[in-house]
Image (cartoon, rainbow, N blue to C red):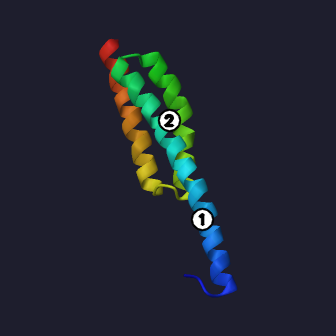
């Protein structure tokens, strides 16, 4: 348990930051799920639209430290690759 005033303040700050980070991570995962559901449904237009919304959310998570920057980049790249494959297959 925190004894000093500064340690107690640090605990409060950590709790606040954790709550914000959880919300941001959850929002990012929701965006990714929407893209993946559109891909699974085979709807290329909907997948592209969902990807447009997901890409900045994922990138922001990487910048904020919610996920590692390279992990965020990898997620974006893999989703883009799957959408491109969908478009190529339907064309």
Give the quadrant of residue 85.
top left
Quarter containing the C terminus: top left
Which residue lies at the image location 65% right of the left edge and 87% below the top edge? 4
Q: Residues within 10 Å of mark 2 (few under 14, many from 20)?
A: some
Cα separation between marks 1 and 2? 25 Å
Q: Is residue 3 above or below residue 61?
A: below
Of residue 18 and residue 4, the one placed in the foreground of this image is 4
Task: Determine whether, in the image, residue 19 is placed left or right of residue 75.
Answer: right
As helix, strand or loop, the secondary structure at mark 1 comes to helix
Which residue lies at the image location 34% right of the left edge and 23% below the top edge? 40
Q: Is residue 70 above or below residue 49?
A: below
Q: Return the x and y of residue 11 as percentages of the image width and height.
A: 61, 73
Q: Name the residue under label 1.
A: 15
Task: Determine whether, in the image, residue 13 is placed left or right of residue 86.
Answer: right
As helix, strand or loop, the secondary structure at mark 2 comes to helix
Of residue 85 and residue 12, the one placed in the foreground of this image is 12
Q: Return the x and y of residue 56 as percentages of the image width and height.
A: 57, 40
Task: Determine whether, in the image, residue 26 is placed left or right of residue 81.
Answer: right
Which residue lies at the image location 57% right of the left edge and 48% below the top edge? 23
Q: Return the x and y of residue 45 as percentages of the image width and height.
A: 47, 17
Q: How crowded is mark 1: few (under 14 residues within 10 Å), some or many (20 or more)?
A: few
Identify the disc placed on residue 31: 2
Give the quadrant of residue 12.
bottom right
| Callout 1–callout 2 Cβ contact below 8 Å | no
Identify the disc placed on residue 1: none
Which residue lies at the image location 56% right of the left edge and 55% below the top edge? 21
Marked residue nearer the N-terminal end (1 or 2): 1
């Amino acid at each position: 348990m925190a004894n000093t005033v500064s340690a107690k303040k640090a605990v409060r700050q950590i709790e606040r930051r954790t709550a914000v980070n959880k919300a941001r991570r959850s929002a990012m995962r929701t965006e990714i799920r929407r893209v993946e559901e559109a891909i699974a449904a085979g709807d290329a237009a909907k997948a592209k639209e969902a990807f447009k919304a997901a890409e900045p959310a994922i990138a922001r998570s990487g910048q904020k430290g919610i996920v590692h920057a390279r992990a965020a980049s990898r997620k974006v790249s893999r989703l883009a690759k799957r959408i491109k494959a969908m478009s190529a297959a339907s064309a």
